[in-house]
Structure formats: structure tokens, C-alpha cells
Image (spheres, rainbow, N blue to C red):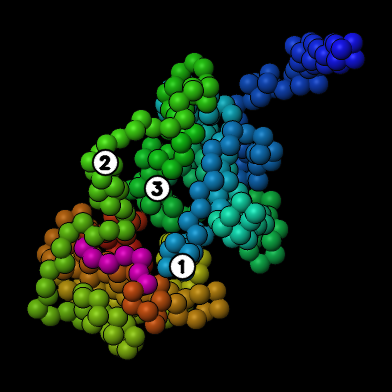
Amino acid sequence: MKMRSKTLASGLAICLAMGLLACQPQSSNSSEPETVSKKTSFYELDSTGALIRPTDYRTWVFVGTPVTPNDLNNGKAPFPEFHNVYIDPVSYEHYKATGQWREGTILMKELVSVGTKAAVSGNGYFMGEFIGLEATIKSAKDFPNEPGNWAYFSFTNPETGILAETGNAFEAASCNSCHEGNAQDDFVFTQYYPVLSAAKGYGAGSPENVSRRTAEKKSPSAVAQDQSMDDENDPWMATAPTPELASSDVPVKLDPLFAYLQSGNYRKFKYQESENHPSIGPHTQLGLPVRVYYNETIAKSLLDGQKEHPKGSAVVKEMFDADNILAGWAVMVKTQDTSDGGKGWFWYEGISVSDKTKMAAIGNGVPGCQSCHTIGSDMVRSNVSAIQ
């Protein structure tokens, strides 16, 4: 009995000691919050306008880690790796207080490969190795001509695996148009980051301290409605019917289209790019080789500088893998006289040259396609010099 009391007393003494220590100021960390609060800029550009690679970003506010694996994208996801995203702490506090992205906001995206798909906890997607680093910055001062004043940078070198010390901004067409058309909040995909969704305009306090962790239970009909809305909002679903075309150089029905592409007859078009070149869009993967072919209808319209291309205009893009082997096609065909915001165009992207069912998109008015093509000449982003 005495031994038990002694044990309890010792335990109590330890707990009290730990409690007292916990209440005491930690001198080694006391200056850190003050230092962070005084810092307002978390990036630096060199004399050429290139972004000097930011450091210590893992100490910033962690936003989340989306992944779009190949397994869920017919074996060819544009961005198959994990993306660890961090935001500088001052911008996070500003966003939490105002619901707006401040001048000088910077988000870092750390790319991590998909490693094993099995663990003791079960099957899934688990992180592998660090493979790259990217950044996005909002600044009217530094990027006055960029849409939304957002600029995008990469420090990734897939060949050496060594990050570059500086990075130049991507061309606006390669990133901004997709972000502008699909991101929920001023070019930022906050709809996929609950940390940001919860923080937006929260004001004083911390949203993570709220006790609720699950949404309110919904009725079966409400769940079904949500699922229906998800389908309607899928950026790769057609939003308009594909009309029948009396005559077209490129078919707009899956079976004849796939047979046509496999035949390679589009290579007979008079107007075509002379060689493969790195893609500036998400077809197959940013930077992989592509080559574009134009039927005479679209080529003549582009050369004449027409703002609205005629019905029957057609473009076929060959997409290659890292070994320069043909891996799929992207197709656009004008199916009506007016573009109607992209619904007048038929879109197709196939990610296999042997299996017609492996597609990223097919049909008229595909938001994921037209959002990137809106900056083009009536949805066509080709450089006219390529067909002269």
C-alpha cells in the first residue's frame, strides 16, 4: 500500500514537473514567430527576372498533397506524382483574414514520385522520392502583364535530378489559361485544398481548432444530387452534343476517328509542323514531344487571320512519350459555324494508339480542353509560322 502511494506520488511529481516546464517560455523558439511576422517577402528575382529558388519552404503552412495517379487516368496522367504544396505564412494569414490573395503570395509545389502501392496498412499510393520543385507567385509589380498577375516557375531537372538555382517563368499560355478556366479562387485550385477552403476569410482565430471534422449527414437524395453535380462539373465531360457532319476530313465519331488516326492519313495534309517539338500544354505531359497537322480549311483560315474559323476546320496533334514513340493523339474539329465558347468544337484526346477506349476526353464543349484553348485564335493555339 505504501509502495503504491509512493509510486503515485512520484508519478504526480513527474506530471507536475512536466506541466510546469510546459508553461515556461521556450527561450530557443521565442524569437521565431516574431521573425516570421516581420518577414513579408518570401521570394527574390535576380537581375534577369528569374526566380531564385526559395529555401526553407517546408517550414511554411502546409496546404495539402493531391495526386492524380496513372492508374486512375488510363495509364497516362498529365501529372502523376504527389504534389506537396506550401504557402508562405504571411500570405496564409492575409488570406485567412481577408479571403484574398495578397501581393507577393508564393506557393511552392514539391513533386514526389509514387512509390510502393502496398503497405502494412493496406493497398494505396505511397510517396517515393523527391523529383522536382515548382513555384507560383502573385505580383502585379513583378508580373504586370501575366493573367491575374500570377507567374509559374520550375526548378526541376528530370535528367540530372538536381534542382536549378533559378527558374524562368513559363509562358502564360502553358499554365495560366488552365488555372483561369478551372481554378476556384483567383487562379488557385482551392477546391482541392480543404486547408485553404476552411481558412478563406475566417478572420481571427484558427479554423483547425473547430471541433467539427465531418460534414453533416445528407439524405440519399441529396447524395445522389451531389454525385450528379460532380458529373456535370467534370472538366473532361462533353457539355454539348456532337452534330453529324455531311463531310469532314477528320471523323467525329469514335470508331471511324480511331481507325482514321491509326491509318495516319492526316499526315497527307499539306500543312504540318516540320518536326516534333516539346509540348507547352498538358497533352501527354508538359515538355514531351508533339507534332501538329492542319487540314486545308483551318490552315487557310489561320493564314488569312480569320477570327472565326469555318466549320470543317480540323487539327490533329501527335503525342509522343519520352522515347519519342507515338503514344496518342489530340484532335479538334469545328462542327458548327460559331464556336459558342468551345461547344462548337469537337475535342478528342486518346492516350493509346492501340486501345480506343483509353481516352482523356471526347465530344463537344469539353471544359478541360477549351479552358486552355480560349487564348488561341478561335480556340486554335498554333503558331501560324508553323504552317507557312
- Asked if the residue at tag 1 contacts the one at tag 3, i.e. Cβ–Cβ closer than 8 Å, the answer is no
* Residue 347: assigned label: none
Could you tell whether 252 is left or right of 110 in the image? left
Could you tell whether 241 is left or right of 49 in the image? left
| Rendering coords of residue 49 (x, y %) | 58, 46
Q: Is residue 87 above or below residue 157?
A: above
> Which kind of residue does numbered mark 3 sit on?
His
Gap between marks 2 and 3 measured at Cα:
33 Å
Q: Secondary structure at mark 1?
A: loop
Q: From the image, tell me which residue sits under label 3.
A: 179
| Rendering coords of residue 276 (x, y %) | 46, 77
The residue that appears at 65% across and 21% down in the rendered structure is 38
The residue that appears at 23% across and 82% down in the rendered structure is 256
Could you tell whether 244 is left or right of 365 in the image? left
| Rendering coords of residue 316 (x, y %) | 32, 75
Q: From the image, tell me which residue sits under label 1.
A: 76
Name the image quarter holding the N terminus: top right
Give the label, 2 or 3, closer to the camera: 2
Q: From the image, tell me which residue sits under label 2.
A: 220
The residue that appears at 49% across and 23% down in the rendered structure is 211
The residue that appears at 27% across and 67% down in the rendered structure is 362
Q: Secondary structure at mark 3?
A: helix
Gap between marks 3 and 1 measured at Cα:
21 Å
Q: Which residues are magenta?
A: 358-364
Q: Quadrant of residue 380?
A: bottom left
Give the label, 2 or 1, closer to the camera: 2
Q: Earlier in the sequence, mark 2 or mark 1?
A: 1
Name the image quarter holding the C terminus: bottom left
Gap between marks 2 and 1 measured at Cα:
34 Å
Q: Nearer the viewer, residue 271 or 117?
A: 117
Give the label, 3 or 1, closer to the camera: 1
Q: Is residue 324 above or below residue 136?
A: below
